[in-house]
Image: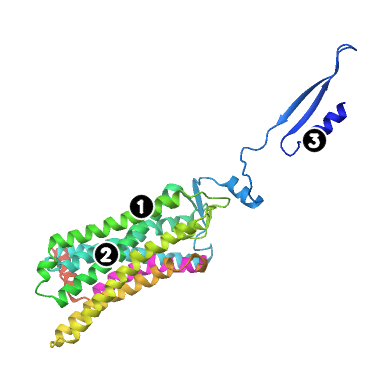
């Protein structure tokens, strides 16, 4: 009887295990007693799923921290490269801060164009404060971990600053269009109230867009490895770690990229097409040179920004590689913020005059 019952219990082995413990009777007339000990199945049960999918669902967790694999390795060449990045970030921060100070202090620069340029300089200071310090610490201190809160902070501010810059460049092109094509209506169309409203709209749209993408990305389930193959938190890099289906969200990212990149870029192209046709009809050679100098500086910045951003966010994720993403990220977080104040100062006579005037005042104060 004992062996038959034991064989019967084995038939249910796929669901639970039964261990039989026979207790000796105290008298010859007392029957043998059997006590059973059952072990229940695991809590995580996923029915009608392949084994790999089942394991992935069971391992899905809410991440509390990630590991940034970084950009640099601990070699002499990469140490020199880190020193160059730090120098570039300090230059970018100082140059943009100086540009903001000049526009604020010099009354001749209190015009709509320089009001928007001050906004652009503030946006270019963001990567120097958000990305570079953490990247430097990860290179100098072992660990390279980043908390979920800090990762979300990086994503939010980078998306907000980047999105705002794209919209602001479109606003700046409209400002140049009105100044060159409708100079007599310029004081009316681009008054202080209009400038403040356009700047507020830029920041609000960028903040809403960044909030949506940050909230969604931070609430995705992440399975297994928490290693981010990047030197800061970015949406495409995190999507590769998620074990959920992100195809719909990737489509939404593509659509929002079109709204925030291609539509402003189309406005810029239309504005400068009209500007170019107006400049070519000018009879004054000096007026043509001044208009072209101002517009060429802005177009250079537009090319730097949109070239890197479209390459990063418009391409499908299947065409992304970690090495390419890192190089493009270095370009728009380090190189572009350095070049923007140089472009607007060296190729802008008003800014150069304000800088010379400030240097003269500093020299007089130092002599006294």
Q: Is 310 placed left or right of 45 in the picture? A: left
Q: Point out the stretch of residues depicted in magenta.
A: 321-345
Q: Position of residue 99 (x, y in %)?
A: 23, 66
* In this rendering, the label closer to the viewer, 2 or 1: 1
Q: Nearer the viewer, residue 139 or 35?
A: 35
Q: Which residue is mark 2?
A: 120
Q: Residue at x 19, y 70 (%)?
A: 175
Counting from the top left corner in percent of width and height, residue 330 is at 42, 66
On residue 10, the disc is: 3
When the figure is inspected, residue 298 is found, relative to residue 288, above or below; the finding is above
Q: Nearer the viewer, mark 1 or mark 3?
A: 3
Label 1: which residue? 211
Q: Nearer the viewer, residue 201 or 9?
A: 9
Distance (Cα) linking label 1 and label 3 = 55 Å
Q: Quadrant of the N terminus?
A: top right
Q: Residues within 10 Å of mark 2 (few under 14, many from 20)?
A: many
Residue 228 forms part of the magenta stretch? no
Q: Is residue 13 left or right of residue 121?
A: right
Disc on the earlier residue, 3 or 2:
3
> Residues under labels 3 and 2: Cα distance?
73 Å
**Whole-number angstrom distance, CA of label 2 to CA of label 1:** 21 Å
């Amino acid at each position: 009887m004992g062996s038959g019952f034991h064989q019967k219990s084995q038939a249910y082995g796929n669901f639970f295990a039964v261990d039989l413990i026979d207790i000796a009777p105290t008298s010859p007339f007392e029957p043998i007693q059997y006590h059973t000990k059952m072990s229940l199945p695991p809590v995580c049960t996923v029915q009608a799923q392949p084994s790999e999918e089942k394991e992935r669902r069971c391992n899905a967790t809410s991440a509390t921290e990630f590991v940034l694999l970084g950009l640099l390795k601990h070699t002499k060449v990469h140490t020199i490269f880190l020193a160059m990045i730090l120098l570039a970030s300090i230059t970018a921060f100082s140059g943009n801060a100086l540009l903001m100070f000049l526009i604020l202090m010099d009354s001749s620069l209190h015009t709509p164009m320089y009001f928007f340029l001050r906004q652009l300089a503030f946006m270019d200071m963001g990567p120097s404060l958000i990305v570079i310090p953490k990247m430097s610490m990860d290179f100098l201190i072992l660990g390279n971990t980043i908390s979920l809160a800090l990762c979300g902070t990086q994503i939010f501010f980078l998306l907000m600053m980047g999105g705002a810059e794209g919209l602001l460049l479109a606003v700046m092109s409209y400002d140049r269009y009105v100044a060159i094509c409708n100079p007599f209506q310029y004081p009316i169309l681009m008054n202080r109230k209009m400038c403040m409203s356009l700047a507020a709209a830029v920041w609000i749209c960028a903040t809403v867009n960044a909030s949506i993408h940050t909230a969604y990305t931070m609430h995705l389930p992440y399975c297994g490895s928490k290693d981010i193959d990047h030197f800061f938190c970015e949406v495409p890099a995190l999507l590769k770690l998620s074990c959920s289906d992100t195809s719909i969200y990737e489509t939404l990212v593509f659509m929002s990229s079109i709204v925030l990149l291609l539509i402003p870029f189309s406005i810029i192209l239309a504005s400068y097409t009209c500007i170019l046709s107006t400049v070519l009809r000018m009879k004054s050679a000096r007026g043509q040179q001044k208009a072209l100098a101002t517009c060429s500086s802005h177009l250079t910045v537009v090319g730097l920004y949109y070239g890197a951003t479209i390459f990063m966010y418009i391409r499908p994720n299947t065409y992304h590689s970690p090495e390419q993403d890192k190089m493009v990220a270095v370009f728009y977080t380090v190189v572009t913020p350095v070049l923007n104040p140089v472009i607007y100062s060296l190729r802008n006579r008003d800014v150069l005059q304000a800088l010379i005037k400030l240097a003269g005042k500093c020299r007089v104060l130092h002599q006294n």
